[in-house]
Image (cartoon, rainbow, N blue to C red):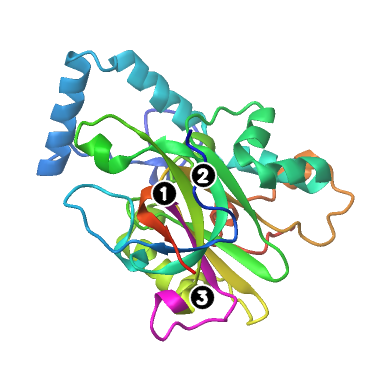
Amino acid sequence: MSDHDHEHDHSRTFQPDHAEPTSEGARVGLALRELLIEAGHYTAEEEQAVIASMQGASPENGGRIVAKAWTDPAYKERLLANGAAAIRELGFELEPYEFTVMENTDDTHNVIVCTLCSCYPRALLGMSPAWYKSSSYRARVVREPRSVLAEFGVELTDEVDVRVHDSTAELRYMVLPQRPEGTADWPEEQLAKLITRDSLVGTQRNLETT
Amino acid sequence: MNEPVFQVGQRVRIDDRTPPVHHRVPAYAKGKIGIVERVCGLHGEPEKFIRGDGKPPQRIYRVLIQQDKLWESYEGTQGDKLEIEIFEHWLESVE
């Protein structure tokens, strides 16, 4: 019997400490950070503020934007024409990137990758999943998108074209997934809960309503 | 000043060069021909920035390329496409 009295199960909540950096690359990164702060390029407090704002970001933000677009056709039009401006309307800060929102339709499926590194709309959606950063996803989804999507459970017929977006420079992307059938009378807040991280990247196509 | 050189719908070729510095054009797209899908904003040129030459603004375009023009024996439909961001100084017009 443990000496503290609470209900959660440690086998589920235990998380190992982050390991001390041991690779040469990690050490160089730490040294560089210290030098940049010492030289006055930015302060440790500024760094903390950026990390905190990124930790506050999550796919729920994307859910809010998508639900708004589903229920407000004029907003959707603005979102597709100029993603950054429309997203700022909802109070999100996106500087300095341009933001492009790609709409899935009955005959087009969009999927996002950064082949050169792992650019991801972190400031809006939070940290990217590990697979998004893997060299396997990055190398394969541009070359054989249909196979990779099938591995994620997205089976596409030949009636649906795939459009891969390689985020190689200064733009950030988000997919606008399709609104599921049978949700016509759902309020925006309820719709927002349907949207998953993977559907915003394009590795999920159909959203579950149950 | 800084007016876009290329317009939406224009056919462009992505240059096939490999400067010995950081640049944002993946090898698979070099030398390939596509269509300007969207004219984007001005952003700092990575090759100059990495040399410490500031961030001179360069126009970015989104270039739409047929998948079967990118890869030999591509498995998919004729409609499958890839879109990629390319800086203006990497593009040339194709008749």
- The quadrant in which the N terminus of chain A is found is top left
- Residue occupied by mark 1: B88
Is circle 2 on the same chain as circle 3? no
Amino acid type indicated by mark 2: Pro
Give how far across and how far down residue A49 sits, in percent: 41, 19
Instruction: Classify B87 as above or below B26.
Output: above
| B86 displayed left or right of A47 | right
- At x 68%, y 59%, the residue is A207
Amino acid type indicated by mark 1: Glu
- At x 42%, y 41%, the residue is A13
The span picked out in magenta is: B69-86
Q: What is the number of the mark on residue A146?
A: 3
In-front residue for pair A94/A180: A94
| A198 displayed left or right of A43 | right
- Say which label, 1 or 2, has the lower sequence index: 2
Question: Mark 3, chain letter?
Answer: A
Instruction: Classify B76 as above or below A92.
Output: below
Q: Are marks 1 and 2 in contact (CB under 8 Å)?
A: yes
For the image, the number of numbered tags is 3
SS for dot 1: helix
Give how far across and how far down residue A79 sits, in percent: 69, 42
